[in-house]
């Protein structure tokens, strides 16, 4: 697993939430929980 790819996926997730204009607490929840899981899934597919 390349550690350099993780920040890229997190940035993509952050950008999506900014575009969707989701409220702060909800955004933080997804970034800490679902966001990490989706990042792991994306890395596993590579």
Image: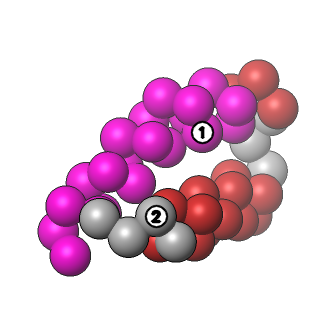
Secondary structure of the residue carrying numbered label 1: helix
How packed mark 2 is, by other alpha carbons closer than 10 Å (few <14, some 14-19, many 20 or more), is: few
Q: Is residue 31 highlighted in magenta?
A: yes
x 78%, y 57%: residue: 18
Residue 41 location in percent, x, y? 25, 54
Residue 44 location in percent, x, y? 19, 61
- Which is in the foreground here, disc 1 or disc 2? 2
Tag 1 near tag 2, CB within 8 Å: no
Secondary structure of the residue carrying numbered label 2: loop
Q: According to the image, label 2 marks what residue?
A: 3
x 49%, y 43%: residue: 35
Horizontally, is 35 left or right of 44 in the view?
right
Q: Is residue 28 highlighted in magenta?
A: yes
Residue 16 location in percent, x, y? 64, 62
x 52%, y 71%: residue: 4
Residues 20 and 30: in front is: 30
N-terminal label among 1 and 2? 2
Q: Is residue 19 above or below residue 37?
A: below
Q: Is residue 23 above or below residue 4?
A: above
| Quadrant position of residue 23 | top right
How packed mark 1 is, by other alpha carbons closer than 10 Å (few <14, some 14-19, many 20 or more), is: some
Q: According to the image, label 1 marks what residue?
A: 31
Residues 36 and 4: in front is: 4
| Quadrant position of residue 13 | bottom right
Horizontally, is 21 left or right of 39 in the view?
right
Residue 28 location in percent, x, y? 70, 31
Q: Which residues are magenta?
A: 27-46
Q: Is residue 43 above or below residue 34?
A: below
């Amino acid at each position: 697993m390349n550690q350099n790819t993780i920040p890229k996926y997190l940035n993509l997730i952050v950008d999506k939430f900014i575009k969707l204009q989701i409220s702060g607490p909800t955004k933080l929840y997804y970034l800490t929980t679902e966001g990490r899981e989706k990042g792991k899934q994306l890395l596993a597919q590579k």
